[in-house]
Amino acid sequence: MSILIDANSRVLVQGLTGKEATFHAQRMLEYGTRLVAGVTPGKGGQVHLGLPVFNTVEEAVRAEAPEVSIIFVPPLAGAEAIMEAAEAGIKLIVCITEGIPLLDMLRARSWTKKYGTNLIGPNTPGLISPGQSKVGIMPGHIHRTGSVGIISRSGTLTYEAVNQLTTMGLGQSTAVGIGGDPVVGLKFVELLEMFRTDEQTRAVVMIGEIGGQAEEDAADYLKASGYPKPVLAYVAGRTAPPGKRLGHAGAIIEGRQGSAGDKIDRLREAGVKIIDNPARIGLMTAELLSARP
Amino acid sequence: MLIHEFQAKNFLRELGWRIPASALAESAKEAKRLAIELGCPVMLKAQVLAGGRGQAGGVQKASTPEEAERLASRLLGSRLITAQTGAQGLPVNSLLVEKAIGLKKEYYCGLAVDRRNETLVAIVSRQGGLNIEELSGSRPELIKKIYFDPDGGLKQFQSRQLAYFLELPENLVKDFVARMKRLSEFFLEKDLKLLEINPLAWSEDDQLLAVDARMDFDDCSLARHPELAALRDESQENELEKRARRFGLNYLKMNGSIGCLVNGAGLAMATMDIIQHFGGQPANFLDIGGGVTEEAVSQAFELLLSDSQVVSALINIFGGIVRCDLVARGVLAAASRISLNRPVVVRLEGTNVAEGRRILEESGLPFIFAADFEQAARLAVELSGQPR
């Protein structure tokens, strides 16, 4: 098993006819993802990449019964796209869009909470269960099916980590990018809990970064739950100056909160194996797993 | 996007808040004239986009117009270094000359996004003028927080709770409640991330006064607020950072000697970290982003090398959406304009890596290729003259 998506997941693409969405939808189809429909207002009735296009998510859900939606729409339309998918009954929303205004995201989050919808992102590369389904924009070929779960706030740094694992002969159960914005949907805690009960997953690699409290919350959860699987973590941004945003809107040390040092201390206290050198994520995971039966 | 105190006060005035009489001066002569007009004593407040101005000498009191002129001539044209500016400081191009007013009591009042609780929060403190974060650690009993949602704004009863917590005199409570409602609506309408009135004061003539103000708008929302984008003061930004923004690059100047060019914010942070791990110091954070063009890569590379502190450079690309060949072409375009007089370590991985490497190799330029992330970092550190 994997978490959140598998070979049977039926996937809708919101904004399918756009340039970026078209490019990535093709890559997803090549990977074997079960794309079933697209939504672009005003283009209902067309067929794009062999997929039926609908004007609204509601229509797409009625006709094709997708349970997952991946969103590629402009930033100022992002929050509405999330709300529309939540209201239409989509169970998992993956929002790739970067640059959604913060207050819009607060409004969108209150909708996903109201409908009990799982949201990944925004500003995420998406997620992949290697060999089964890819709902995202990551390069599929660097992944292998296996037993390491990955939860990351980053994009290319996740590819780097995955590549290191694959090179060491370690495959992945599911790799999830949770997104680099200040307000995102599922975070470390919820995903660690999913990996906890996932039989395929033997270890979890967390890739955190400066800003926010998600890593600290994960440390509290791991400590309180007596987590049964080994967890490793790399936290990016040790060199970051306070008050400066490092690329991601969420990656900023505010006051004394959110520094890499604090996060690392808290995770270490919770029994997490800390990775200091980001070039050794694969090696350290391999060492940890080989030391265990 | 931060705006200046005087700009924030203009908004507050429109929203019905009382502000001490003040005007902007860009020369010492103007400061003197304003000091005469307003009547001394006056405060001279350096308009820079950073906190900690007071402790850094950026806020000074003048008892006479002559003193105002003298202090202003010293402040204007200087660079103010506060705890938040970094060693370079920020240029003081204007001063807010403000009538100094006797205060009975000072408070803190702020509106902010609480990212952890995914909601909005109004925060007040019985002590003002201080750093609210430090205060919330040391004297939490002085602080009250009230949460509100992004669709309605603060309710009147919530503002009343804040007012009575502050123990405002009864004749100021009604004013405060009415103003807080409009302030929270303004916060939502203009997409703010943070709004602080610090201190908010009870003056000796029994008025509620906004003595200092700070507003931080959400950059992601500026596309729907063109009137706000016009408030940006580019003189407060680092030259290199400004140039980077024009090309859609995320660049941040640091103080080390190894220039970095990376795709993706997380990998860029990790690249800075690994440089430090091996004993080097990064000269910058630079994320070229996902939708980057050849032209932007070329600008990025030129920008990186235009920093005279850079001794060696490290290009670290994990191609996903960004293709290695596009990065290679961009780097070569820059190299044709400027001389490559410093060692450049290149690590390419992912989409079109072979093509990217071929392009750089065939250029005949002295790029140093690394097989992986760690080797790249070690080489760049060695070449920066700071081996471990």
Image (cartoon, coloured by chain):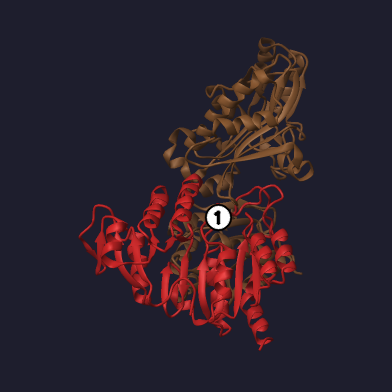
Give the image location of residue A25, x and y in percent.
Answer: 34, 67
Q: Residue at x 69, y 71 (%)?
A: A272
Left or right of A45 on screen, residue B14: right
Question: Which residue position holds label 1?
Answer: A248
Of helix, strand and loop, which one carries label 1?
loop
Can the viewer see residue A167 in this picture? Answer: yes
- Disc 1 marks a residue whose amino acid type is His
> What is the x, y in percent for residue A248?
55, 55
Q: Is residue B377 above or below residue A97?
A: below
- What residue do we see at 50% from left, 37% from top? B188
State which chain is coloured red. A
Percent across and percent down for residue B42 are: 72, 18
Which is more toward the observer, A208 or B306? A208
**Circle 1 Cα neighbour tier, 10 Å, few/some/many (<14 / 14–19 / ≥20):** many
Query: For the C terminus of chain B, which image quadrant?
Result: bottom right
A148 vs B79: above or below: below
Q: Which chain is brown?
A: B
